[in-house]
């Protein structure tokens, strides 16, 4: 906390002078303990939002209202993004999709209604008093997610917390306590009362985390995936000895992990939702199109087309934007094209069509297709990778030629002399 001491002490003094309590809370306290504190600082305070706004005006470089209904004021000071929320004591109507908020009077009360003990630690200011009424520090040392109260009550109050458990598993690499897993399994169906937007936001964070496999596995094993992303558990096709084929569910998680490793090839680098969601969905058309052929093989005719349709439907249900939906859907639709490449057999115009159809998504299609070049047969995987290297080289050569062609004027020598 030494690094941020100047800013948090300052804020503590201002609030104390006005007779209000304020504490650093949640994510930044947890992340400081993990040695990965960043510049997003969340605070909780006894001050009502109007008072908070008055106290930070003049001190912060900019102040805005994040949601006065929820009691949150946002501001920026230097490189710090700050959110200050009034103490809460929530009363939920289990039938409503949105929790209604009541302000609370104590820090302990506020911490008690938080999702997990590791998120229910605070540092009271200005004295930097560590507050940890639910033993978050012990759970953090054991890398486990536990609820401050009974998990059934907590998830009953806000079922989104079950999604948040999976999200934190993927972000932090923590496991969930046995009783938390049990409650998630028992109450999975309750997630359906939560708005699609809130579920989507957690799903995005989960998929973009360093360990998406951990979070997704938890969603599937507890049955939550059945409600938020049923296409994923459906990939666990029963295998039979006669028609051997790879496990599409495990394959999907592996492709997703390979995508993570290849993301530095994308224009922005780093976690990329489009690449990751496309990897997650690329084979969802397989269960619906699977046919056992008399010769002992298994086919998945046009699973790209079916998969694209299922992807669009799922993303619309989760209220993703039109652009996000279109991008991921297109990648799913195009990911099999390379299978027809057959070691350089494509004509130049086939290569140009590939580039044209991918459009702006070409770098993403490269990443997805390369990630999908996995098979248990190492030599085959290596050959596919080399073949894709060759395709990319051809694309580079062709576009260089085209660039040269485009700077040559559309006039012949005589016309130029004229
Ligand atoms: P991140 O690094 O992603 O911001 P975070 O822990 O700060 O992680 P937020 O979603 O920003 O997560 O929430 C801030 C804090 O508010 C959490 O640490 C947690 O204490 C509390 N919180 C957020 N959402 C809920 C919820 N649905 N139920 C209970 N507590 C919540
Ligand atoms: Mg936060």
Image (tube, helix red, strand yellow):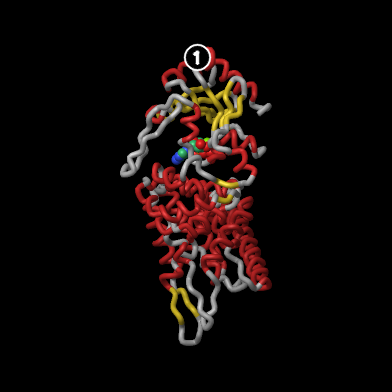
- Is disc 1 surrounded by few (<14), some (14 to 19) or many (20+) residues within 10 Å? few
For the view shown, which residue lies furthest in the top direction?
17
Is residue 359 among the parts visible in the rendering? no
User: 362 or 121, which lies in front?
Assistant: 121
Give the residue pinned by disc 1: 19
Q: Residue at x 32, y 42 (%)?
A: 96
What x and y, as percent, mark residue 285?
44, 67
* One can see residue 226 in this view: yes
Above or below, comparing residue 125 to residue 136 in the picture: above
- Secondary structure, mark 1, is loop
Label 1 CB less than 8 angstroms from ligand 1? no
Rendered-image quadrant of the N terminus: top right
Picture quarter containing residue 367? Answer: bottom right
- In the image, 411 versus 289, the foreground residue is 289
Which residue extends farthest bottom? 295
The residue positioned 43% from the left and 62% from the top of the image is 231
Q: How many marks?
A: 1
Residue 9: x and y in percent read 61, 20
Q: Measured from the top left, where is residue 123 in percent x and y?
A: 59, 28
The x and y percentages for residue 105 are 44, 24
In this rendering, the answer to whether 26 lies above or below 320 is: above
């Amino acid at each position: 906390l030494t690094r941020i001491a100047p800013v948090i002490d300052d804020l503590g003094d201002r609030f104390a002078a006005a007779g209000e309590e304020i504490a650093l809370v949640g994510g930044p306290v947890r992340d400081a303990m993990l040695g990965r504190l960043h510049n997003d600082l969340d605070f909780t305070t006894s001050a009502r939002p109007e008072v908070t706004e008055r106290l930070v005006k003049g001190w912060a470089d900019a102040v805005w209202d994040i949601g006065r209904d929820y009691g949150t004021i946002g501001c920026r000071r230097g490189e710090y993004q700050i959110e200050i929320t009034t103490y809460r004591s929530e009363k939920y109507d289990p039938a409503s999709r949105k929790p209604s908020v009541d302000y609370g009077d104590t820090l302990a009360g506020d911490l008690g209604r938080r999702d997990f003990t590791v998120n229910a630690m605070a540092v009271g200011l200005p004295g930097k008093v560590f507050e940890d009424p639910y033993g978050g520090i012990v759970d953090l040392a054991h890398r486990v997610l536990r609820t401050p109260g009974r998990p059934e009550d907590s998830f009953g109050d806000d079922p989104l917390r079950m999604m948040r458990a999976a999200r934190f598993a993927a972000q932090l690499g923590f496991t969930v306590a046995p009783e938390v897993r049990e409650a998630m399994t028992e109450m999975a169906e309750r997630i359906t009362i939560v708005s699609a937007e809130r579920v989507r936001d957690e799903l995005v964070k989960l998929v973009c985390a360093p360990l998406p496999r951990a979070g997704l596995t938890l969603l599937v094993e507890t049955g939550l995936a059945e409600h938020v992303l049923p296409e994923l558990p459906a990939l666990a096709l029963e295998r039979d000895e006669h028609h051997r084929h790879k496990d599409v569910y495990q394959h999907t998680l592996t492709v997703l992990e390979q995508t993570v490793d290849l993301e530095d090839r994308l224009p922005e680098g780093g976690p990329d939702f489009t690449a990751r969601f496309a990897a997650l969905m690329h084979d969802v058309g397989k269960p619906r199109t699977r046919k056992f052929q008399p010769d002992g093989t298994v086919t998945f005719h046009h699973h790209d087309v079916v998969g694209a349709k299922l992807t669009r439907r799922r993303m619309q249900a989760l209220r993703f934007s039109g652009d996000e939906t279109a991008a991921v859907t297109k990648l799913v639709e195009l990911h099999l094209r390379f299978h027809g490449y057959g070691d350089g057999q494509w004509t130049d115009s086939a290569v140009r069509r590939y580039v044209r159809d991918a459009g702006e998504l070409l770098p993403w299609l490269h990443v997805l297709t390369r990630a999908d070049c996995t098979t248990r047969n190492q030599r085959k995987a290596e050959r596919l990778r080399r073949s894709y290297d060759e395709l990319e080289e051809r694309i580079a050569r062709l576009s260089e030629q085209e660039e040269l062609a485009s700077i040559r004027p559309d006039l012949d020598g005589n016309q130029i002399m004229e």
